[in-house]
Image (cartoon, rainbow, N blue to C red):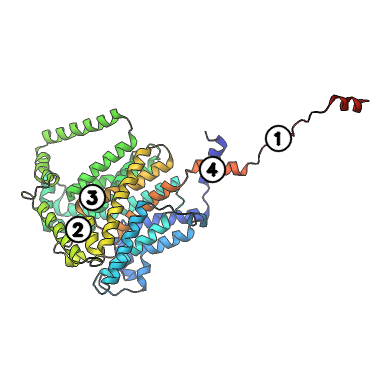
Amino acid sequence: MIPNRLISSQTSGASRLSLPRLFRRALLAALFFFHPAAHSIVGKAYFALTGLNSMFVPLGGNVFLQPAILLSAALLIMTPVANRLLPRRWDGVSIGLGLLFVGAVTGLAWNFRADVVAMTFCSVFLSGLFVFVSLVRYPLEESDIHTIFVALSLGLMFPLMAGLQVFYQNWGIPDLSTVIAAHSSANGIQAYEEVTFGSRGNTASLLVLVGPPLLALLFDRRRVSWPKAIYALCLALIVVNLVILQQRAAIFICLVSIAFLWCFKAKTVSSHILYLATGAVVLFAVTTYSPAVANLIDERFVPALTWDVDSDHSVSGRTEAIQEGVGLAVANLPFGLGPGSAVKVHSQGSAHQFNVQQGLENGVIGFLGSVVLSISALLLLIRAISAGDRLPATRWRFIFAVGPASYLVHGVLANVAINFGWVNTWVVLFVGMLALALSADRDIPAEVSEVRRSLVRTPPPFRRPPQVAVPLQVLLTRQS
């Protein structure tokens, strides 16, 4: 048990924020607010001001004006020296990210004259390196969780609400048939794509990354009410946008992330049986009482789940894209075609599979890094689930790990966006969450460290010297 005086001192200390902690928290909020809003008016204004609004302009010193680099460098400076000098424990996530970075460096060196390659390296891999180094040893606190995800939610609302506004202007308040028609109409959905993140796949990748941690925070009983209201509003916008997008892999991964959350919260066999029974009842009710939804599942989701190449054009196109990506990767061994090159050399602009895409662009080293990273992120999440909801550090680890793990599962099934030109929203949030998950994984819980520090500071209790036996003859002599 932890003494009450330690708990009270910790609470009072948390309520009195020092100036460096305030600065760190402001920098965290800026980092996680700007990047979800980077393709809205907030980000476009900054990129236009710094000259980072074109992919084909020769690189200059303004690459270091990327918000990810500036804010990460400031965070690194503001992080206590004791945290930065702690010995590092190598793990699969760090190794995977390191291999990806080395693969990108070799791909850049081998294909330096190719268009888009240097820009993608600076936008994705250089920025990701700064973000990871600044956050992997960040002294995480409970209030930082609110700071990060409230800022992220507010930033994400800019593109999501802009997309809903454009969709409403074109289609009004739609029913299900209207949404399906809008999805099938290339011209009808184009304006929506332009104001969100450039394509439906880009938007779906981001929602898969940020939706699961927000859901975990919404159902965390320890959270105060006002951040939960922001999380609930952002999640409602995510659900509506997922219905508009109808990206089957994204919807499937979001359902899987709900199962991750259930396994984290519930530990008994009866609770898992209840979860499965509830899912079966909901699916039965939807297919029975909503024929439109049942037809949508039969026509769009069943062929994707069964990988029916013959009856689904999207599945067959994805298969052809993967095969073409494998062919290009093998033809350009060992260093690949360079970061970001798939958009120019692949006939569909993407290999539609994360690991194949990395092999195509960053060669053998990048492919190995993507495999190690995918497996390690899943193992990090499984370890968080097995630890359960017991300590603050275990909750933090799950909250920060569930989004990147879902994002990578989505990438293995259907590829994911990493950047959209200089808009590097995906890589910044992905690497930032992974780094903070590792920080929570490595750090000693605050109450345990407080007890240890108190034991070090407390002097040993005074001990009376032992009594020495005196012979009776000596005592009699003294008395006489």
- Classify residue 255 as left or right of residue 446: left
Q: Amino acid at mark 4?
A: Glu
- Classify residue 1 as left or right of residue 281: right
C-alpha separation, residue under disc 1 versus residue under disc 2 = 74 Å
C-alpha separation, residue under disc 1 versus residue under disc 4 = 26 Å
Q: Which residue is mark 3?
A: 410
Judging depth in this view, the residue of 11 and 130 nearest the camera is 130
Secondary element at tag 4? helix
Which residue is found at the position 27% from the left and 51% from the top?
Answer: 408
1 or 4: tag closer to the N-terminus: 4
Give the number of the disc on residue 183.
none
Q: Which residue is mark 4?
A: 450
C-alpha separation, residue under disc 3 versus residue under disc 1 = 64 Å
3 or 1: tag closer to the N-terminus: 3
Secondary element at tag 3? helix
Q: Which residue is mark 2?
A: 199
